[in-house]
Amino acid sequence: MDILTLKCLTFIEITNTPFFKFKIAFRTLDVICNAMRIQGETKIRVRYGETDQMGFLYYGYYALYYEVARAELIRELGYPYSDMEKDGTVMPVVKVQAKYLRPARYDDLIRIQTEMEVHPKHPFVVFYHKFYSATEDLIHKAEVTLTFFDPISQKRAPMPLRLMEIIAQQNNP
């Protein structure tokens, strides 16, 4: 076996799944050994209360918009955050990088293109966000890194098996 296969097998063993679920995880092994990406988009209208004195979207609200876009992408996959939390995993943000290119203004309808990248060799998931104006100008982009976390043990956790299966299906129809 090569090193990549060993890392993937270790990842699956870490999930501590029962034997019957191990077979499901093993079938997706060839897919999850490489980084996978899933895309989605959502639209948000800038509300008056989210703007500063200049009428621009206040910079702090961009993070809230990232969260809306992430939550909608995961919901579209069929595994909303609320279900993931019920299954015992949360996803705290560990890093944000943002580039403000042009301002979003009050009442603008912003299209947010979101791409999720997962890789089995670490317990992180990266979301790439691109904000477009109504005229399709790129006005903002960001990279947000989250980790999988067990709130009971207070330690990082592997990607939930259910999410791994959904992502594998999306990348290997």
Image (cartoon, helix red, strand yellow):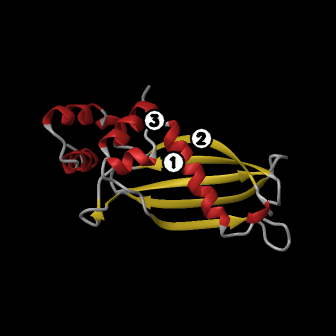
**Left or right placement of residue 99 versus residue 30 in this view:** right
Comes first in the chain, label 2 or label 3? 2
Instruction: Report the front residue among 142 and 68.
Output: 68
* Quadrant of res 106: bottom right
User: Label 1, on which residue?
Assistant: 116
Residue contact at pointers 2 and 1, CB within 8 angstroms: yes
**Residue 28 as seen in the image, left or right of residue 130:** left
Q: Position of residue 143 (x, y in %)?
A: 57, 60
Question: What amino acid type is highlighted by mark number 1?
Answer: Met
Q: Residue furthest left?
A: 19
Name the residue rendered at 52%, 37% in the picture: 76
Q: Nearer the viewer, residue 106 or 124?
A: 106
Circle nearer the N terminus (2, 1): 2
Q: Is residue 83 above or below residue 172?
A: below
Q: Which residue is mark 2?
A: 40
Q: Position of residue 124 (x, y in %)?
A: 40, 57
Mark 1 vs mark 3, foreground winner is: 3
Image quarter where the N terminus lies is: top left
